[in-house]
Amino acid sequence: MNNEDKLTLSAVDLAMLEQLHTDVVDDFLHPDNLFANVVGLGIGVKWKNNQPTGRPALMALVTQKVASHKLSKVNLLPSSLYGIDMDVIPVGRLMAKTSSSQFSAGSSNLTERIRPAQGGYSIGHVRITAGTMGTCVYDLLPKNIGIPKKYYILSNNHVLAEENNAYPGDPIIQPGRVDGGSSPFDTIATLSRFIPIDFEPFIPRYLHNNVVDAAIAQGQLHNLNRAIYWMGHLRGWLPKSKVNVGLLVQKTGRTTGFTRGRIVATNATVDVSYEGGKVARFKDQIVNTAMTAGGDSGSLLITLINHLPFAIGLHFASSPFMSIANQIENVRSLLKVEIAENSSDR
């Protein structure tokens, strides 16, 4: 078995880990039991000496790795749970945030006004700074046949709906405010609907049921382009059963432009910080190597199948160490929109 093969999980190991994760995650992350620095739990493969071993493992997500001799006995993570390896991934402080400045480390034209607008470009609710437009979508059609009645821009709740604080009909501008956009001149859409996010301190995080940070805004067909800058048109989307650790991924975002990474954990339950000290716990998340920064929120995460782009996730949070994305299957089913016409049985 070469190192590339050791990066992924077999179907049997994946099913076993998913069940084990379901059985232990609530107790593992309950505030009464929480280990120091732990912010999440996912599934993946065990690493040793910076090399994948191929062995299935529960992945403890921590803000930082601390030498065992510096930890109190009560905060030492077990090396295994129910006979399955436990590994540790330093993820830093994960933040869901829009851009704080006009600086773009990637391609500077992604902060410019563009019509028709396309994925990868600056966008946002009129009151936020700027995030990223993922792609354009429409309402699910019966048996995937018919004429869509409405067309939408897909991005995050915290980009289009101001962390639950916006109202349907609010203006969405392209580019975002920090990139010079203003209403009404740059209004490209109006907020249509979003999936509300449970936040602490309003709701204790162990009671949260968040799976997506997602929203859509309705625009006119002639103003919207389904293409994603530098990646082209989607050829389909992957159900979460096909999204495995080790998968190579890429995205185009407003701040860092085109970047590539690899999935290091799936099925992750993870705590994410928002503006104003709020924290939201999300379930069923994808954890990738670092490939994003503030302002990339809303970028579509894709993988290539036979050199063709397939959507797998919606990016929404990051740190200098890792990036986090919602499963695109969950985004699609909760918002009831079509991302791309074909799902893959890869």
Image (tube, rainbow, N blue to C red):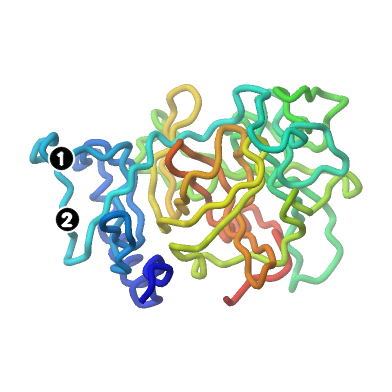
Q: Residue tagged by mark 1?
A: 75
Q: Quadrant of the N terminus?
A: bottom left
Along the viewing direction, whichever of 325 and 330 lies nearer the viewer: 325
**Nearest to viewer (mark 1 / mark 2):** 2
Amino acid type, mark 2: Ser
Residue 145: which quarter of the image? bottom right
Amino acid type, mark 1: Asn
Q: In the image as oriented, which residue stretches furthest toward the right?
A: 222
Dot 1 crowding, Cα within 10 Å, few <14, some 14–19, many 20+: some
For image coordinates 46% across by 65% down, the residue present is 244
Instruction: State how far apart marks 1 and 2 are (Cα).
Output: 12 Å
Percent of width and height locating residue 122: 72, 35
SS of the residue under disc 1: helix
Percent of width and height locating residue 184: 86, 25
Q: Is residue 70 visible?
A: yes
Q: Residue tagged by mark 2?
A: 79
Percent of width and height locating residue 149: 85, 55
Dot 2 crowding, Cα within 10 Å, few <14, some 14–19, many 20+: few
